[in-house]
């Protein structure tokens, strides 16, 4: 056999070994646009599987007791059930853990919008002393010892397990946490007239009415305009919110308008988890909130009757996903 033949064989071998895995198609409801996916972290099944394993793995924390899922619990829409979550050594955090469903669509992350991408966000819980209390590099070194992670890392990113792989795989998994199949969606987008009850319909009308202005801030398919607002929880805030990032006086005590999808599952509510249930949230808005220089003028006394308040609560519950996927 001649040299040419060997070269030819080598070429085929090379080509087949760097053959790219088939792109992963996100299953999206018809009324959702496609989320932006970074070019260096396209979705692949192998990446999502690796990310999912990492998400549930307590080895990411210093004493191997806390995983991402400890505070982002799948059956509670990937949020926590307590006002403030506890991390390694029972350390108490400063803010309430938000839902991660539809996080692929958030233009900025955290309640103060302090981080721009899901890849960058991973550093924060791992290195936060009241969460995982570890170091990104140390996590990568620890997991690189594990044969299974090495194998999955090679398959997903064609390289050894490293911080590069750690942050990207977690972000890829998080981008698959899509939720757009609630009774509200059946009613509003799929025109199933009986998907919601009369009380829920009355609550919906109120939610979208000028009288309440709820949908001015909680707007669009995700029920948020992704802006930073103050809804009058306190006259004095311990947490300065958005101003901690921008250093601007006028951003004091502003917080990201949260999505209301699956809100029934994400109690307690607000940046500090200070309101225990949806009834107390509606009662709060009904009073018009407390005076604060940053408070939005949209938040003012609403004079809702008791039955209007319970209709609003009923409507908010229709935003709950019927079947959560990827939730182990
Ligand atoms: C000890 C509890 C805890 C752990 C562990 C934890 N988180 Fe969080 N997570 C939070 C809290 C609290 C916030 C809100 C912080 C803020 O807004 O400042 C948050 C926010 C986030 C956000 C931003 C959500 C948004 O709406 O902007 C993402 C994404 C996220 N976490 C992913 C992760 C991942 C990935 C891991 C594991 C590597 C993880 N979290 C581990 C408590 C936790
Ligand atoms: C000016 C904008 C604005 C208006 C108007 C508004 N909200 Fe909000 N809403 C917010 C912000 C900002 C937060 C988060 C505050 C925080 O983190 O402390 C929030 C939080 C919530 C929460 C808690 C969500 C969670 O996950 O913690 C619910 C529920 C809610 N709003 C429902 C409503 C309803 C119902 C109305 C109408 C009666 C309404 N909102 C009007 C801005 C607004």
Image (spheres, rainbow, N blue to C red):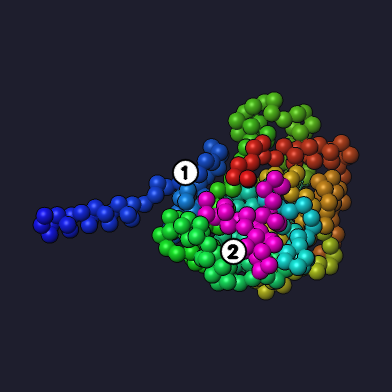
* For residue 64, above or below residue 248: above
For disc 1, the marked residue is 25
Residue 50 screen position, x and y as percent = 52, 54
Of the numbered discs 2 and 1, the one sitting upstream in the chain is: 1
For the point 87% across and 36% down, the residue is: 307
Find out whether residue 69 is within the magenta segment.
yes
| Image position of 305 (left or right of 192) | right
Residue 40 screen position, x and y as percent = 44, 60
* Mark 1 element type: loop
Residue 116 screen position, x and y as percent = 57, 63
Mark 2 C-beta to ligand 1 under 8 Å: yes
* For residue 139, above or below residue 53: below
Residue 318 in view here: yes
Contact flag, marks 2 and 1 (Cβ < 8 Å): no
Residue numbers of the magenta segment? 49-76
- Along the line of sight, which residue is nearer the eye, 305 or 123? 123
For disc 2, the marked residue is 122
**CA separation in Å, label 2 and label 1:** 24 Å
Instruction: Find residue 275 and name its label.
Output: none
For the point 60% across and 30% down, the residue is: 190
Mark 1: give few (<14), some (14-19) or many (20+) Cα within 10 Å: few
Find out whether residue 22 is within the magenta segment.
no
For the point 73% across and 64% down, the residue is: 87
For the point 33% across and 55% down, the residue is: 18
Query: Which picture quadrant has residue 171?
Result: bottom right
Residue 139 screen position, x and y as percent = 58, 68
* For residue 225, above or below residue 187: below
């Amino acid at each position: 056999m001649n040299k040419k033949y060997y070269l030819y064989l080598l070429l085929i071998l090379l080509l087949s070994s760097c053959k790219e895995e088939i792109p992963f198609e996100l299953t999206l409801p018809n009324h959702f646009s496609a989320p932006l996916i970074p070019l260096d972290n396209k979705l692949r099944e192998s990446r999502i599987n690796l990310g999912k394993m990492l998400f549930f793995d307590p080895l990411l924390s210093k004493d191997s007791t806390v995983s991402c899922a400890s505070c982002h619990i799948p059956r509670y829409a990937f949020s926590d059930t307590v006002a403030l979550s506890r991390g390694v050594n029972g350390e108490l955090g400063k803010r309430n853990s938000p839902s991660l469903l539809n996080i692929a669509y958030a233009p900025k992350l955290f309640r103060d919008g302090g981080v721009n991408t899901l890849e960058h966000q991973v550093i924060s819980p791992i290195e936060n002393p009241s969460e995982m209390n570890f170091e990104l590099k140390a996590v990568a070194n620890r997991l690189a010892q594990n044969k299974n992670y090495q194998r999955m890392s090679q398959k997903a990113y064609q390289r050894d397990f490293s911080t590069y792989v750690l942050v990207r795989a977690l972000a890829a998994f998080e981008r698959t946490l899509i939720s757009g199949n609630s009774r509200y969606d059946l009613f509003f987008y799929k025109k199933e007239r009986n998907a919601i009850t009369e009380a829920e319909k009355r609550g919906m009308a109120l939610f979208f009415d000028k009288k309440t202005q709820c949908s001015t801030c909680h707007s669009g398919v995700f029920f948020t305009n992704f802006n930073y607002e103050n809804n009058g929880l306190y006259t004095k805030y311990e947490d300065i919110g958005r101003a901690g990032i921008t250093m601007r006086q006028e951003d004091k005590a502003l917080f990201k308008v949260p999505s209301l999808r699956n809100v029934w599952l994400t109690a307690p509510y607000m940046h500090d988890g200070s309101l225990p249930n949806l009834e107390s949230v509606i009662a709060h808005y009904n009073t018009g909130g407390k005076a604060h220089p940053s408070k939005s003028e949209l938040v003012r006394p609403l004079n809702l009757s008791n039955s209007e308040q319970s209709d609003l609560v009923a409507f908010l519950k229709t935003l709950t996903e019927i079947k959560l996927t990827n939730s182990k």
